[in-house]
Image: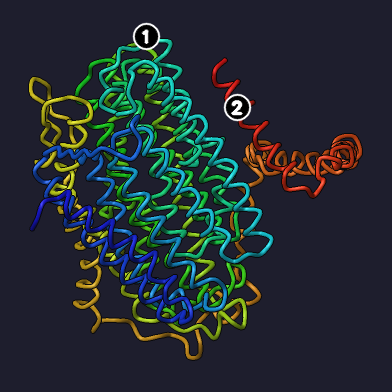
Amino acid sequence: MGNPLELLLISLAIYVAGAILPLLFSRSEQLVIKLSGIASMIGGAFGLLAVIPALLSGQILTFAIAGPFSFANFVVRLDGLAAFMVMVISLLVVVTSLYSLSYVQEYIGKGARYMGFFMNLFIASMVALVVVDNAFYFLVFFEMMSLASYFLVITEQDEEAVNAGLLYFLIAHAGSVLIMIAFFILYKESGSMDFDSFRQATLSTPTASVVFLLAFFGFGAKAGMIPLHGWLPRAHPAAPSHASALMSGVMVKIGIFGIIKVGIDILGATTAWWGLVVLAFGAVSAVLGVLYALAEHDIKKLLAYHTVENIGIILMGVGVGMIGIATQHPVLAVVGILGGLYHLLNHAVFKGLLFLGAGSVMYRVHTKDMELMGGLAKLMPYTAITFLIGTMAISALPPLNGFVSEWFTYQALFTMSHEGPFIMQIAGPIAIIMLAITGALAALCFVKVYGISFAGAARSEKAAQATEVPMPMVLAMVLLAIACIALGVGAPFVSPIIANISSELTGQAAMSVASGSVVYPGTSPQTVLSTPIIALLLIGFFVLPLLIYAVFKGQRLARRHKGNPWACGYGYEDQMAVSAGGFTQPLRTMFAPLYRMRKTLDPSAAMARGMKATINGATRAEPWWEEKVVLPIAQGVLWLGKRIQWLQHGDFRVYCLYVVIALTALMLVTVM
């Protein structure tokens, strides 16, 4: 099948070609859409072929060449974590590229010719970023990713998109500055920009803690954790839906990747309070993210807030794993990282599905407002079924994939609750309660989303006239829905692979997680679950009533009344339907202080005030600068010019004399 690094290089080359070709054929937007979409699909397929052998074998592959800069070698390292991230990116790229073949038709005349360029550049920079093993090139690709995604956010070029793009640009680059400072400290301590030198550097505890905090908040801004999340619910809705799926599904995970890379891979997670910080921010992000999602009527903004929630859940798993490493609890370390990485993969799949489903609804209804949808299940049956699977997965209902990764996170938290020092035994139950609240509110939120958008009667004329989306869009959603089921039911086969990555990161021996328990040598088994058995029980639960009905259907009682029975209000949906706001009004009242806090944490208002003050200051400074600096310099130049005009006699012999004088002066300067 070829060397994994060679296949990875081919994948990157195809992405670059997919970015350049649309610029060469930009006159035909139909051709541009097909070229960019097919190129990214093929690039994603090669990416999967490259990393699957590395994931199965557990080998670490490296490749280094001398870069154009003497201070930075171009080093590629395909270890378990990097291969896992490339797999997640490539999987979602293949599906979203298939989806884009039809979806981007909506953007003909609105920037479709440039969308393919920025999309392929965006994907290529993410893939290169996770495999490069040098701080300089890491930052270069990080900036490429941020800039390419910024241009995807402002595709619509309306006021909302431009403002969202500006906020994203500022927060992303503020995070980049923190990451640069962290890498600079590591460079000063190690004398090299290579990550391998960073790993071998000996840092004092205060220095290591400063590096960790800088990296945590820098990458946390990219991940969208609270309170650095303000850009996320604005940028995701503004971007095209297939770009939103990639930004929410994989780009924010680059922030998680960075936290793991610095906190665990480079610094070794040697201090327990680092993990407690990650756990605390994750728990708060999970609860507040789902609470803020409940109050939204904009379907894409609601999904964006759920990204904040799920980033919080991932951080909880990573935080527990870091605590386990620092306190030398191997089961805690491996199961915590396992839960975080499994949820990272699962969130990419079900959130990608939900964003594509939302894009399909918008493709037909042309609105993000759920109050103008309704009744779409009958008119868009494939979209409705796949979207329902996505809502069940994100609500962590068994046997789908979201349930499995949250189960591992619960297992890690339960383990932490009865091991280690007192602070761990207190933090564990608190985090369990917050995760349970998050799960309950997520289920409530998606009952609202599906009920308001797909059930009942149509709430607008466009919703009443909706039809199913084109086949490439349907097929993309079906593939992700199947992945949601496969990653849940197939957990006994998937979890050992991710557990090996977790063991590699934590420096622990291989741990068995496939036989119904988590077993580490020398420890007692930790109970997990068997999703195939759960799936069979659930199928039986639904089939049994049908069998009973089939047996007794001939013995039904005759109806006592003629005419139409009372039908629970059906037929009066327009007058009796529950609104999205009414559905969550009690919760919004109950948690009003937390919703008020959202305005306090939102940086956009402060940014707007700062921008206005900057403009006013510039307006006041411009006349002063013009009068006090520019005009005096210009007048001085004119005065000097008039004074030295006498040098220009028009006599060629005088000009030769000037040359001799100049050469003599230069010779004297050289001798001196």
The amino acid on which the numbered mark 2 sits, given as a three-letter code, is Leu
Q: Which mark is residue 204?
A: 1
| Residue drawn at x 48%, y 25% as measured from the top left | 181
Q: Residue at x 49, y 38 (%)?
A: 225
Image: 132 above or below 249: above
Quarter of the rendering containing residue 332: top left
Q: Position of residue 102 (x, y in %)?
A: 41, 78
Q: As drawn, is 78 to the left or to the right of 440?
A: left
Q: Secondary structure at mark 1?
A: loop
Q: Residue at x 16, y 47 (%)?
A: 530
The span from disc 2 to disc 1 (Cα, nearest Å) is: 54 Å
SS label for mark 2: helix
Whole-percent x and y of residue 589? 66, 45
Residue 606, image quadrant: top right
Classify the position of the C terminus by image quarter: top right
Question: Which quadrant would the N terminus be assigned to in this image?
Answer: bottom left
Mark 1: give few (<14), some (14-19) or many (20+) Cα within 10 Å.
few
Vertical side of 451 occupied by 304: above or below: above
Q: Residue furthest front?
A: 653
Residue occupied by mark 2 = 666
- Residue 345 vs residue 645: left or right? left
One can see residue 436 in this view = no
